[in-house]
Image: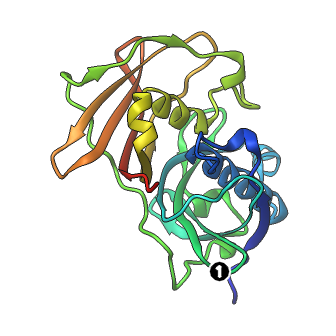
Amino acid sequence: MNIPCLEREFRIHVYETFVDEKANICALFNYMQDIAAEHAIRMGYGRDDLMKDNNFWVLSRMYAEITEYPFRDETILIKTWPSGTDNVFSLRFFDLKFPGGRTIAKASSSWLIIDAETRRIRRPEQALEKLTYFRKSDKTPVRIAEKIRQTPAGGKMSDGFRVKTSDLDVNMHTNNVNYLKWTIDSYDFDFMLKHVPVSVEINYLAESVLGDNITIRTSGAESSPYAFTHSILKDKVQELCRIRIEWKERKN
């Protein structure tokens, strides 16, 4: 049996680019969020389908390796497919390419199914009748996201800010891509002018809502001078998200 997949074109809009006129990292993550939701709906296990059984999806982890960033007005192709389970996680992969086949990025995502009443995790085989759609693919483009180590208490703290209306999703929680956006915005602008992300790993740990007070704690990695781990905190105490970003120098 073939693994069902969905492929779509996306055009890079000017408002999704950085000063170099190339797509920013959050644009790529937004595209993946978009196509994943569409594919789930087409396969009969979208948000509304799960809510019929009082369940809902939660994105728990993501990992992406970025090879190249497309320019504004360029069209790219994104393919996505589910690929089995890993314990309580349902896995989904992404392949981002130019129309000619050149690689842009490859990514994996790990999803949980939560009971809306008890707030407990449900195993995929218990919650999904169509689990055959999740048969594991023989070929995976990139590794599965792993657990990220917590940043040390002595890490650099950002200025605090509040969750705004524009940060929220349909569930009135912070949209998952905005955690990455907040983290990118915490970097020094001069650093951003000279560097670009080549890998991003995210662990989503808890929800945030309108008005929550957010700070970001950052620490460097011993393995690389261009790798940083970030803890996104509520009220400087509760950890909402961990993000690890590895960078490389931009080419002129």
- What amino acid is labelled 1 in the image? Gly
Tell me the residue at 36%/14% (across/down). 236
Q: How many marks?
A: 1
**Which residue has dot 1 on it?**
101
Q: Is residue 208 left or right of residue 199?
A: right
Residue at the spot x=70%, y=57% of the render?
Answer: 36
Task: Label 1: state its secondary structure.
Answer: loop
Query: Observer-nearest residue: 108 or 75?
Result: 75
Residue at image position (15%, 46%) is: 222
Q: Residue at x 43, y 26 (%)?
A: 186
- Please state the horizontal and vertical placement of residue 114, each as a whole percent of the image: 60, 43
- 233 in relation to 151, above or below: above
Is 239 left, or right, of 33 in this rendering? left
Residue closest to the eye, 71 or 147: 71
Q: Nearer the viewer, residue 251 or 51?
A: 251
Q: Is residue 227 above or below residue 153?
A: below
Residue 20 appears at what percent x and percent y? Answer: 58, 46
Q: Is residue 129 above or below residue 215?
A: below
Give the quarter of the figure containing the N terminus: bottom right
